[in-house]
Amino acid sequence: MNRIASEVGNVLTAPLKERNQFVDAAFYDVGALDQSERDLLSPFRDREGSVLVMPPHGSAEEMNHYPNALQFLATEGDRVEAVVVAGVGSSVLGAAALARNVADHYEMRVAAIVSGYGASDVISEALGGWFFYGAVDRAWRQVESLVTNAAAAWQERAVPQKEAYSAEAKAARPLDASQLFTPPATDIGTLYDILTTHRKLRLLLGHSKGNLLISFALRHMAHELGPVGHTAFDRLTVVTLGAVVALHDRFVRQHQFLGGLDMLGRINSQLDIPHVTIPGVGHHLNPAIPMNMSVNRVLEGVGLA
């Protein structure tokens, strides 16, 4: 116990970048990054909501940094077809590692949205991610369930009653949770801007809390578009790792994976939603730690449109 306490104390008192590396290494395959690449990553420059573009390992191309979605889209948005969002406690290091895993598998450049500052905000990020976005995720499903049940019951009523109720129901349309929130200029805002602007996007992958951000952004997008179509509805492949969330059904290409030993992911998942359980796998993606979820193996069964 004394040794554990000592190690925890060392992490808490270490400089910010070292603390971030410790937390990111606990969840992500940071070994996929060269030391020269790690040296170029900084929590002070690559802040929450910024975009990092990672090439496959061994590529002649370099990674690029963008402070926001606008600059990313204007510079190379059309050439990048995949976006990833890492989870709780991740800094730019964890985001870059996740992007590298995906880039290596599909052999293409991948954009990572930085969703946090690492160890410096792991508690607030966990609370903000799991509780706020998780509550919204569950609330949306409850609202949809109520609307569906009400519609089914309505079909049993007589035609005259339908006509009378139709006008009344239209006037008293249920409030969608997305009407209460406009994505800010942070991680969720960056993701929303990319989703609604980038029509060549083929893959959106999240891990842990990142899945909740994805769920939130996709639902907000579907609500804002209403009956208007979008190429993402049929073309975008959405993959979640480490937490099963409610993804809007207008996005038809959905794949969700949960480790059989992933207790953190399990207690924050909606397990009645279709997903694949991977036996003997935990919440982390780092192959240097036993019982990791292998991004490469998971994606072997996920094709892109």
Image: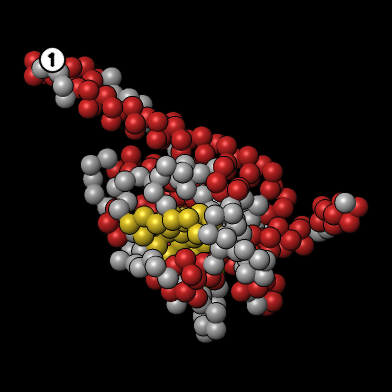
* Residue 30 appearing in the image: no
Q: Quadrant of residue 177?
A: top left
Which of these two is toward me, 90 or 184? Answer: 90
- Which residue lies most toward the front here? 279
In the rendered image, the vertical position of residue 139 relative to residue 301, given as above or below: above
Q: What colouring method underlies this structural image?
A: secondary structure
Q: Is residue 159 left or right of residue 284?
A: left
Q: Residue at x 61, y 47 (%)?
A: 264
Q: Residue at x 28, y 19 (%)?
A: 172
Q: Dot 1: what SS?
A: helix
- Which residue lies most toward the right here? 2
Q: Which residue is mark 1?
A: 161
Percent of width and height locating residue 255:
40, 57
Q: Residue at x 60, y 57 (%)?
A: 282
Percent of width and height locating residue 27:
64, 60
In the rendered image, the vertical position of residue 272 relative to residue 194, given as above or below: above
Label 1, residues with CA under 10 Å away: few <14, some 14-19, many ≥20: few
Q: Quadrant of residue 248?
A: top left
Q: Is residue 270 left or right of residue 57?
A: left
Q: Residue at x 56, y 63 (%)?
A: 293
Q: Split into 4 quadrants, where in the image is the C terminus? A: bottom left
Percent of width and height locating residue 11:
81, 56
Amino acid tagged 1: Gln
Percent of width and height locating residue 284:
61, 59
In the rendered image, the vertical position of residue 118 relative to residue 32, given as above or below: above
